[in-house]
Amino acid sequence: MKLFIFTVILLALCVAGLCVRIWIKGEFTENEIGRNKNMKKLGIKCVKNEETEQHHKNKSGNDCLACSFSGSCDKI
């Protein structure tokens, strides 16, 4: 029973610590790849955006077979 009470108190302290951190910063940390400032600095993009960019490049170029949007390409 002592271990259970200790665990509950420890979890309560952890949750309180996270709440205080969010309260001080005023917002949640952005965890969407496309909106995270640090990810943008590193050049990391959302997979969905990369696929869209590749689709537009392949649509205007000659290599449409390498496109993952093969069913919607105008050249096929």
Image (spheres, grey):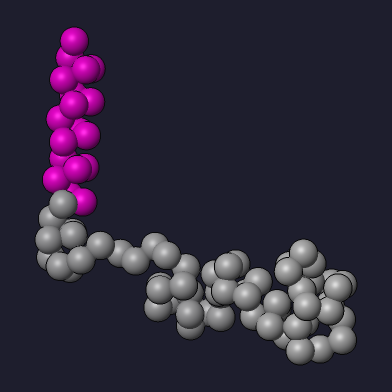
Place of residue 25 in the rendered image (x, y in percent of width and height, measured from the top left): 17, 68
Foreground residue, 64 or 44? 64
Place of residue 73 in the rendered image (x, y in percent of width and height, measured from the top left): 77, 74
Q: Which residue lies at the image location 68% right of the left edge and 83% below the top edge?
A: 56
Segment tinted magenta in the rendering: 1-18
Q: Is residue 6 above or below residue 2?
A: below
Indicate the quadrant containing the C terminus: top left, top right, bottom left or bottom right. Answer: bottom right
Foreground residue, 20 or 74? 74
8 inside magenta stretch: yes
Judge from the rendering whether residue 25 lies leftward or rightward of residue 53; answer left or right.
left
Q: Is residue 12 above or below residue 7?
A: below
Q: Is residue 63 above or below residue 66?
A: below
5 inside magenta stretch: yes
Judge from the rendering whether residue 22 lies leftward or rightward of residue 70; answer left or right.
left
Query: Please, what is the dominant secondary structure of the magenta stretch?
Result: helix
Q: Which residue lies at the image location 14% right of the left edge and 45% below the top edge?
A: 16
Q: Is residue 6 above or below residue 73?
A: above
Query: Which picture quadrant has residue 45?
Result: bottom right
Judge from the rendering whether residue 35 lies leftward or rightward of residue 9; answer left or right.
right
Q: How many marks?
A: 0
Indicate the quadrant containing the N terminus: top left, top right, bottom left or bottom right. Answer: top left
Q: Which residue lies at the image location 16% right of the left edge and 40% below the top edge?
A: 13
Q: Which residue lies at the image location 48% right of the left edge and 83% below the top edge?
A: 41
Place of residue 35 in the rendered image (x, y in percent of width and height, measured from the top left): 40, 73
Place of residue 47 in the rendered image (x, y in percent of width and height, measured from the top left): 60, 67
Query: Which picture quadrant has residue 30?
Result: bottom left
Which residue is most to the bottom?
Answer: 60
